[in-house]
Amino acid sequence: RLLREQVALLQKRLDALEAKQTETAKQVASTPAPAKDAAIVTIGNKGPLISSPDKKYTFEMHTRIQYDGHFFPDNADGRDEFYLRRAIISFRGQMGPAFFRLSPNFASSFAMEDAWIEMSFSKALRFTAGKILSLEGHENVQNNAHLLFSERSLANNMTPGREIGVKLDGKPYGWLQYGVSVTNGALDSQPSNNNANLSDEMLLSGLVLLSPFAADKESPLAGLTFGASASIGNEDVTLDGTTDKTMRYSTAGRNAFLTIQNGTHVYGQRYRINPQLRYYLGSFGLLSEYMYSSYEMNRGGVEHTIGNSGFTVQASYILTGEKNGYALIKPNKPFNLKGEGWGAFEVGMRYNFFKGDEDLFAGNASTMLASTTSVQKASSIGAMVKWHMSENLMWALNYEVTDFSGKGIDKNSEQALITRMQLDF
């Protein structure tokens, strides 16, 4: 009797299981199959991505927030404050053979960081049109999320930041990268410009970078890249302090130390020369460049050919053993509140200087300067520490001392302590 009851119970359970399986099969059968052209949505470490099944059409959205604090031990050097350095929503995508990027910055004042369309024919040839990064300045071209220091160097004062124009570039070989652009030609130190053509003239720029040992991954020189950029054009504009028509050279503390006076006529031939180098070996990284920028200037009948120059060298080491590089640093063990990982820790130093042309300070030529605030030379040494909590989250602390010398006003050293919390997703 007991055996018959157990067999009946097992049969009842089996019938119930078969009924459930039959119902599930019916539901699956009634569910429509995904359309062959349905979009694929994924979310990874770099934000959401929508793509067609064949990946010929894509749309991405990225967010970058940089929240900074500037503190000055000497109140005369500046005002202690927290502020939003960048709040960028970047839209990127592909439409068949064309790529695009649109990156508005909603920080303290609105600026369009990037707005370009690119046709990529091969690794060796890309054509880009719109608001693009200048080819000049090794540190200038580096993504601001990957900079070693929160603010770029004194030498970077002589780069234009962004340009509006067209560019051809590519990497035909693993050891060779090139670029050629024709742009409106922004003046020095114009990172958030409108890039209007100020003089009905164009600026021709070129870049060549060599990585001769890149193919030999075992070589200690595999991470060596060096080369130069240069530009030449003509200018014809009178400075008036408005956007694009300003030449103001600043420290890491974002304080001006040399300003070309309103009313100065910038005319004739202008050019820049920019040799550059970077080297990465394991956890060690080095970046260095020299910048020379020349203009013809006239104010009050005094004419001079002005040549300003600058140099920077910076080095860093990742204490936790991750691979250093010009781009993103990925922690081996991202920070976790449970203590399973602490991220990557990086330390570094930087020396950089700027030298203004002596003719700016000679006799009547000094009328070209904002004389109560301008000094000829600035040199700076700084130290930094970074905590890369993950690929997307980073905290940095910089301390930099800038000394002033040469002609112009007698200016005390600037001490700046800069902190940054960065989210890049």
Image: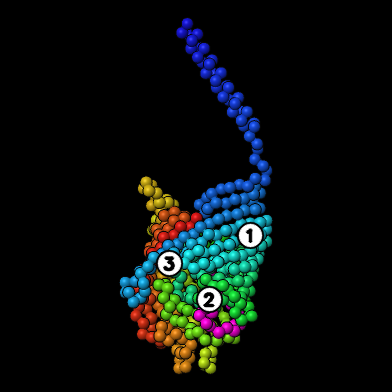
The segment highlighted magenta reads 226-246
Q: Nearer the viewer, mark 2 or mark 1?
A: 2
Amino acid type indicated by mark 3 = Phe
Q: Main secondary structure of the magenta part?
A: strand
Amino acid type indicated by mark 2 = Thr
Q: Nearer the viewer, mark 2 or mark 3?
A: 2
Q: How many marks?
A: 3
Which residue is label 2 attached to? 243
| Secondary element at image label 2 | loop
| Secondary element at image label 3 | loop
In the rendered structure, which disc, 2 or 3, sits on the residue that comes first in sequence? 3
- Position of residue 374 measured from the top left corner of the image (x, y, whole percent): 42, 83
Instruction: Kindly identify the residue that appears in the image at 53 percent across and 57 percent down.
Output: 62
- Position of residue 351 measured from the top left corner of the image (x, y, whole percent): 41, 73
Of residue 384 and residue 259, the one placed in the foreground of this image is 259
Relative height, residue 112 to residue 337 (above, below): below
Which residue is label 1 attached to? 99
Q: Which quarter of the figure has residue 102?
A: bottom right
Instruction: Kindly identify the residue that appears in the image at 63 percent across and 63 percent down.
Output: 117
